Image (cartoon, grey):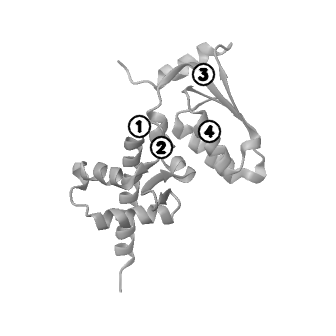
Amino acid sequence: MVSSTGIRASQKIVFSSAEFLLSSLIKLCENSIDSIITRNQVWNEIKSNDECRDWTKSHFYVTLNNLKYSKYINVDSKNNSVMYTNKAKLKLVDLIAKDRVGVDSYRFISFDIPELLRKQRDAFRRTIKRMGFIQIQKSLWVINKDVGDLVEITALEYGIEKYVIYFVSAKSDIDGIIDRKFSRLRPNN
């Protein structure tokens, strides 16, 4: 009989392998999370990483199949290609947003999600925080990166798109407040 500790340790290994494989896909996609890449490209990326020198092709395919079964990726066997699902993009939203280049104009989100959708609202709030949004007022959030596609995916995945507004502003009367909030987040030079 396998102990619960052994099962948890095994699950942790499987989960960390899957998470590593997903993050490796980001490197291959080069900031375009909608890229379609081949399984061979993914395998070559894995093998070039020092942490995965001991991975076998069998381990790689098992992990890839686990990601497919968990609906994190779509694998097209006919074209030998791999593509992220929206579920995977949400899982890695912080890594994807981190690589986005800052822009001159601010991006705002305002939302008013009903109490009946509390779980979705809380998940949405956690996700936009992971993207890098900061709260300006109760339901007004701002970021200085172009993450509109990620916001759209997030709202659609949580089924709250009709309660979320995303807009871009070149100038506002609260730019000074926003600048100060962002400057507090930057590490000291």
Q: How far apart are the two marked residues, 3 and 4, measured between alpha carbons?
A: 14 Å
Q: How far apart are the two marked residues, 4 and 1, measured between alpha carbons?
A: 19 Å
User: Looking at the picture, does residue 37 appear above or below residue 64?
Assistant: above
- Which element is circle 4 on? helix
Please tell me which residue lies in front, 17 or 83.
83
Of circles 2 and 1, the one toward us is 2
N-term-proximal mark, 2 vs 3: 2
User: Looking at the picture, does residue 187 appear above or below residue 7?
Assistant: above
Q: Position of residue 40 (x, y in %)?
A: 33, 54
Query: Mark on residue 151?
Result: 4
Q: Going 47% across and 59% down the picture, which residue do you hit? A: 75
Question: How many C-alpha atoms fall within 10 Å of the one at disc 3: few (<14), some, or many (≥20)?
Answer: some
Quarter residue 2 falls in: bottom left
Query: Mark on residue 90?
Result: none
The residue under label 1 is: 30
- Which element is circle 3 on? strand
Query: Mark on residue 35?
Result: 2
Q: How far apart are the two marked residues, 2 and 1, measured between alpha carbons?
A: 9 Å
N-term-proximal mark, 3 vs 1: 1
